[in-house]
Image (tube, grey):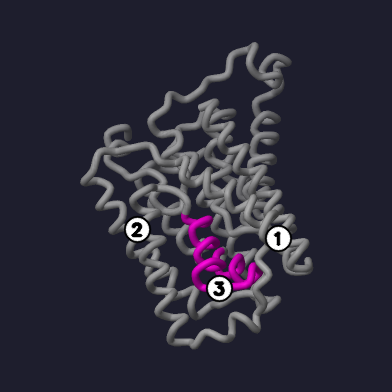
Amino acid sequence: MNGIRGKVKQGSIMGNESLFRDKPVWKASSDSLPMEKFNMPQILITILVTFFAGMGAGLGTGFAGMSAAAVISPMLITFLDMEPYMAVGIALSSDVLASAVSAYTYGKNKNLDVKNGLIMMLTVMLFTVVGSWLSSLVPSQAMGSFSVFMTFLLGVKFIVRPVMTTKEDMSKASPAKRAVQSVLSGILIGLICGFVGAGGGMMMLLILISVLGYELKTAVGTSVFIMTFTALTGAVSHFAIGGMPDLTVLVLCFVFTLLWARIAAKFANKASAKTLNRATGIVLVILGLAIFLFSQLS
């Protein structure tokens, strides 16, 4: 298992595992965590950790198309002493249905570009593999901070300079131009995700709103649509290599992430552009700071 893990580009598909792969796992002592100090039953600890992990991941997914791996992985590693590779597998599994339900909600409200989303998805998946191969040719460096920085930076951007693009503005680009932009954007995102091993969800959102000129709701809807398939690919590959995870943790993360993603997606599709920008910005800033904190504890 350890031998296999050393050869695998961890977190190469939309994950954030590179933050933790070169650091020793932090182990809680009886004096370091209140839950341990007061002899809290392990199942209750597990429920609390997975609840807050799922809440953060679900809100990030429903509001901004953020990968659950960025939130769930560090919490499972830090508080449940879980092996990083398996933690990312559980996070990606939680991402699948949460992203699918979020995409359905956005699509139902006509905030999803399926055609160009499919083009970008196929390109991202192909060039993620290329990026992973390229990364194996250079010295390994922990670059998970890239995802944390982008999450925080995007949050600040949404608060300070909201995305006020409308669907009318989006319609000005020709279908052919939009398709070419989707391919080129997919190549860039895939290469960065594969090479760096992190930041896919945030990269997609940034490029969809800044390069392709999407309005925020359509950008998030298209992002979670793509994330459904990339997360599925990542989860299957993780479990195929690392074996089956702790089913209790998997089910709890799955349920809590789905619940909060559904709540966030419904709110996002009903909110005004100004309100959504502020809410998304606040969520991303908080999550960015939380992920950074957990990475320091690990």
**Which amino acid type is shown beneath numbered disc 3?**
Gly
Camera sees residue 142:
yes
Label 1 crowd (10 A; few <14 / some 14-19 / many >=20): many
How far apart in space, not on screen, are marks 1 and 2 (Cα)? 28 Å
Relative to 69, does residue 78 appear above or below in the rendering? above
Residue 6 occupies quadrant: top left
Mark 1 is on which residue type?
A: Asn
Q: Residue 191 carries which label?
A: 2
Q: Which mark is residue 213?
A: 3
Image quarter where the N terminus lies is top left
- Where residue 93 appears, as percent x and y from the top left, is 52, 52
Number of other residues with Cα within 10 Å of mark 3, as a class: few under 14, some 14 to 19, many 20 or more: many
Q: Does the magenta stretch include residue 96?
A: no
For marks 1 and 2, the one nearer the N-term is 2
Q: Tell which circle, 3 or 2, labels the residue nearer the N-terminal end.
A: 2
The residue range painted magenta reads 200-223
Q: Mark 1 = which residue?
A: 277
Quadrant housing residue 263: bottom right
Pointer 2: residues within 10 angstroms few (<14), some, or many (20+)?
many
Rendered residue at 66%/55% (across/down): 258
Q: Which residue is drawn at 76% across and 64% down?
A: 274
